[in-house]
Amino acid sequence: MMKFPILTIVAGLPAFIALILLPIKNERLFKVVSLIGSLLTFTVSLPLYFAFQTNSEFQFTELCNWIPAIGASYNLGIDGISLFMVLLTTFLTPIIILSSWNSVKKSMKGFLIAMLMLETGILGAFMALDLLLFYMFWEVMLIPMYFLIGIWGGERRIYAAIKFVLYTVVGSLLMLVAILFIYYYHGGLTGDYTFNLLKIQQIHIPLGYQTWLFLAFGLSFAIKAPIFPFHTWLPDAHVEAPTGGSVILAGVLLKMGTYGFLRFCLPLFPHAVEKFTPLLLTLGVIGIIYGALVAMVQPDMKKLVAYSSVSHLGFVIIGVFSMNAQGVAGGVIQMVNHGLSTGALFLLVGMIYERRHTRLISEFGGLAKQLPIFTVFFMIATLSSIGLPGLNGFVGEYLILLGAFLHDKTYAIFATSGVILAAVYMLYMFQRVMFGKLENEKNKKLADLSAREICLMVPILALIILIGVYPGFILRKIEPSVNHLIHSVKTKQALEQKIDEPLALDTTHP
Amino acid sequence: MNLTTSIIAASPAIALGVTGFVVVALGLFLKNASRYVFLAVSLLGLIISAGLAVNIWDQNLTGFSKMILADNFALVFYLLFIVSAILSMLLAMGSHEQQYMLFPEYFSVTLFATVGMGLMAASSNLLIIFLGLETLSISLYVLAAMKRTNEASLESAFKYFLLGAFSSSFLLYGIALVYGASGGFDLSNIAQVLSAGATGGEHKLLLIGGLLIVIGLGFKVALFPFHMWAPDVYQGAPTPITAFMSTGSKAAGFAAMLRILFTVTDGAAQDWNGILSVLAVSAMFVGNISALRQQNIKRMLAYSSIAHAGYILVGIVAWNETGAAGVIFYLLAYTFMNIGAFGALSFLSSEKRDIVARSDIQGLASSRPITAFLIATFMFALAGLPPTAGFMGKFYLFSAAVKAGHVWLVILGVINSMISLYYYLGIVISMYMRSSDKTETYARPNIAIAISLALAVTASLGLGLFPSFLMNTFEKVVSVIL
């Protein structure tokens, strides 16, 4: 049966556009081509939302042999969780390209190619339902991101790029070992050697193994997310990356970590999840508070936003590991929200940096008079990040806290403090930058946002408000998948309670 | 009739050897001929040999009283060596170092080396394996000393000769002990003696003999602690020759090792796992950690080749079909990516300027973007990042080890991959992220090297994305030695 391979088209289009760019010499032309190409990708991905049936099945699935020798297949499909990750990616990419229009000074073409290849890698990783295919895409993302930081980054870019790569690779190589282990375990048990996630999900992995496998997968995702104490690569990467790189990094790449927990760790290792939930919730809470406290004292706006990411991703972790409908759905929607609000903040910080070549808060003050449009945009993004009711941040954080409260009140109480701290550090920065007297001479000559900059900000801000007012259009599609996930994890957990250590399985298969 | 079969079974090697002599003879008569004539004849010979190998595919011929085998395992390695020879000859054609090379002789010696490699893979008789190794080694001593006027190069060649002679004697002594214990040179005879239940003394003798054989071959594949020659020789020899040596001779060593270990120690794998694991792990760590600090790229690749030998040994330790097939796959992938890496250096070097240090390629991405992209691809492949052949190969080897239950070995392996990433990325950083302070002059692009690089990069990516056909083939191929 040949179906229309829409996922392949969505994921492959950016790479295809990147190839088209190669021979083009005219700078204006390849900028326009890449912008149109990324917009086209977004347009093609939009029908995914409308055609997505509101149920928990994987949809638009594509399955064909890739390496039949070892049972690896080209297996794509999305459910309610990955749907929005895919859309977020295709939505942000054209915005990033537009935002980098004039700010990338050297080899613009290389930048665009790296960005588009990165988009393909990310989309593939969100769509892959085959462990080996996922791993391929997961690692493929690494190379363009490494170039984005290392070539177009700030002063300490080489250090940041290497740190980013090594941190990520530490996790992912251990994940590879775990993938191999599961592959042979599943193969030995069922006789079917396959990397197909949906098939592998159906077996029960002995509890002793689950712990190690969970740790191997979890380390990889914890570094990516990042969960405290694995976050130290993030401020460096963010601060050194060019604006576009920071946006894609914060907006989408970090979600790869939390998405990984949802897609792989929960269904594959339910028992280990149960065992590690208190630890992860604690780390989540520490991340929230630690990220917020460190953000508060940052003199650099970009660094502040970077640390706020640590704090916000802590919320997502808490949501995911609350293991109830509210928490997980909140976690997923918060992943989208964080992509939008932090993306917007990075873009705005980038805009002011282009004008003043500094991001130090102390250099600014009183910008509200000089840059009214900028200030309004910044305010919306700030309030969204804080979680003001009526904007998107509120929806996610509310659901997460609700979920955490249902799970265990203690975590919820500590996590809530993050909301207050967020208000402190974000508003404190906003106040210092926007209000007060316009004293610095250099700031008096600043021009307000150009038409291009307004064009690229408006869609994000509109979405921020739309999700805040009417989150139903997202939640509706997420819910069945989330419920299904929780149900299957809980069922497996209950079953595995009854199984003692399955000795019979251990002896013959490693 | 019998002789005909024998000749057909040995035909790939015979074709190579005959071509070698033809090239020398031509050199005598055509004193002023362009070196392209010799290249054409040599390539023709290699391609004919490959054709002859394909021709007897699946026929499982044996020749000369079982001295020469033409099973698929041997044939696959013939093809691998031929690929390595073709790619490195193309490099030699375009390299500025050709001024050091005696042209017809270079081609014929390379062809003789290929014969030696072929014999190492195509026999189950220890004496023939030894003969092959000697043919290969003596050819390589000549090749390594090609830069006759360069002292450092001569020193390294001499070092290689001394250590090589040592390793040959280790191998020979091992063969003698094995013969003493089993009364035969043929691997299947030895296996029979072993499985019939050798007595305590004989068993020990066989073990010691086997160990000495592994050591002898360990020199050839540059395993720690038999690797001392590699960095100097790799650095000292002309780059095209280094490329050939590092891939072909490594593959030949592993071909012999695979056949010997898998045929003989059937069922006695436990005796070997410990020592081979230690060799694998130490090769990985020593190679990678020493490579970290190298500023000279050829030297860095030399140390990393020690580490690659360690990864490959992991596949042998796994002791299963996947592992053996993985070894062949990895050797093939390594041939392409390593020749690619060395070739790219040749591509940039000119008589005025030899490009060998990291600082030489600073800012390459802006002056020679395509070459920089190629080097980056080879580096990512050597580091084992997807979607390259290097990743698939490593994945294959490690997967075999996990299958066999050696999870710890694999964890040490991936830790090493991570260490290696640091220095491979270092090259990429030099090319892409640092700008050159002086105006760099690189050689004008040369068509022969460009063809070689194009083949290498296509294969490095192609094997990574679509490995299925070769994986299937190799898994069938190794069934003859299991």
Image (cartoon, rainbow, N blue to C red):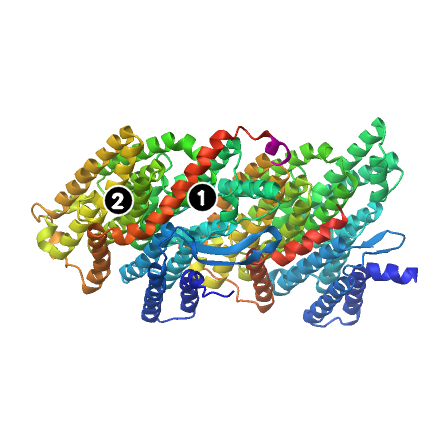
Q: Tell me the element at label 1.
A: helix
- Separation of residues labelled 2 and 1 (CA atoms): 22 Å
| Viewer-side residue, B324 vs A329 | A329
Q: Chain of mark 2?
A: A
Magenta stretch, residue numbers: A504-510
**Residue B361 point in image, percent of width and height:** 48, 55
Label 1 belongs to which residue? Answer: A264
Q: Residues within 10 Å of mark 2 (few under 14, many from 20)?
A: many
Quadrant where the N terminus of chain B sits is bottom right
x and y, in percent, of residue A273 in the image: 42, 35
Q: Is residue A232 left or right of residue A65?
A: left
The secondary element bearing badge 2 is classed as: helix
Q: Residue at x 52, y 49 (%)?
A: A196
Residue A220, horizontal then vertical, whole percent:
44, 41
Q: Amino acid at mark 2?
A: Gly
Residue B393 in view here: yes
The structure residue drawn at horizontal position 45% and vertical position 50%, both measured from the top left corner, is: A138
- Write down the quadrant of residue A324 in the picture: top left
- Nearer to the camera, A361 or A99: A99
Q: Quadrant of the C terminus of chain B?
A: top right
Asked whether A484 or A443 is in front, the reply is A484
Question: Which is more toward the observer, A373 or A180?
Answer: A180
Q: Which mark is residue A396?
A: 2
Q: Residues within 10 Å of mark 1 (few under 14, many from 20)?
A: some
